[in-house]
Image (cartoon, rainbow, N blue to C red):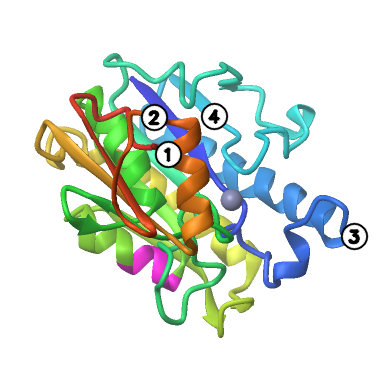
Amino acid sequence: MKIYIMTDLEGISGVDSIDMIPEANDGYQKAVAYLCDDINAAVEGAIRGGATEVVVRDGHGSGHNFDRNQLDPRAVRDDTKEYAGMLDDSYSGVLVIGAHAMAGTKNAFLDHTQSSVTWHNYYINGVRCGELAQYASVAGHHNVPVLFVSGDEAACQEARTFFTGVEAVAVKNAVGRNQAVCYDRNECLEKIRDGVQRSLSLIGKIKPYQPLLPMEIRVEFNRADYCDTAVETKPYLERLDARTVRKITNSRREILL
Ligand SMILES: [Zn+2]
C-alpha cells in the first residue's frame, strides 16, 4: 500500500509566527526542524496503518526546506520537477501535513492561496477554494483520495468542508492572521501519528476530490497590473475583467494558471 505525503510549512506544529517563515529569519531553522518532526510522525502513523511505501513532497516555497537526513529513512522524497511528479494511480491515499486555509479565511494562520501578494481569490468551477482543494484535485486526477490533513483550526475546518469524512488534526489556533497559539507539540505529534494511522482505514470509503471536467480555473488578482502580467506571459488566459482571468482545462492536475 502506497501513501503520498504533501507538506507545507505554515500549518506545522510549533510554527506560531509569520516571522518563522522567511528563510533569512532565525526562526526558520526551527520551523523546518518542526516540519520534519510532523512528517516523521505521519510516516510512523502510515506504516503502523499498513503502508508499505511512503513518499514525501517538500511542498513549501522552493521545495528545499527540510534536511533529508532528518527524514525517517523509511520514507522516500519526491524531488521530481513537476509538482507531485511521483504521485500516480498506484497510490491508495494522500496525507497533507502543515496545511493553511485559503485566502480570505477569517481567524486563519497565514491564510493565502499560492501568492499572498498577487492572488486575491481562486475558484475551481465557480467554487472559491485554496491549496487544499488544489492538492486534492491533483490527487483526484489519479483517483486517489485525501485521507488526512493537519494544520491550524481553520485549515482543518476547510478540509472537513471539502473532503467529507477526512481525518483532520489541528495543531494550533490563529490569533489574527500572523500569529497562532500552538498546542503542546508532543501531543500534536502523537495526534498526527494516531490520526494518520486511523485515516488509512478510510481507504475505499472516502471519495477522491474530482471537480467536474472540463474544469474552469479562475483567479482574481489583487491588482490589475498583476492581471496584465498574467495575460502577457500566458496568452491562453481569458481576461474577464480588470483583475480576473480564467482558463478551461480537461486535466485535474492543471490547477494553476
Ligand atoms: Zn507554504
At x 57%, y 38%, the residue is 59
Q: Quadrant of residue 90?
A: top left
Which mark lies nearer to you, 1 or 4? 1
Q: Which mark is residue 115?
A: none
> Upstream in the sequence, badge 4 or badge 2?
4
Q: Position of residue 153 (x, y in %)?
A: 43, 72
- Looking at the image, is 236 positioned above or below residue 28? above
Instruction: Please say whether residue 73 is one of the residues in the magenta stretch.
Output: no
Label 3 near ligand 1 (CB < 8 Å): no
Q: Are marks 1 and 2 in contact (CB under 8 Å)?
A: yes
Q: Are marks 3 and 4 in contact (CB under 8 Å)?
A: no
**Residue 2 or residue 115, whichever sits in front:** 115
At x 55%, y 63%, the residue is 188
> Upstream in the sequence, badge 1 or badge 4?
4
What amino acid type is highlighted by mark number 2?
Pro
Quarter of the image that includes the N terminus: top left
Q: Which residue is mark 4?
A: 56
Kindly report the distance in space between the C-alpha atoms of the residues bearing marks 2 and 3. 41 Å
Q: Are marks 2 and 3 in contact (CB under 8 Å)?
A: no
Q: Which residue is mark 1?
A: 231
Q: Which residue is mark 2?
A: 235
What amino acid type is highlighted by mark number 1?
Val
Q: Which mark is residue 26?
A: 3
Q: How many marks?
A: 4
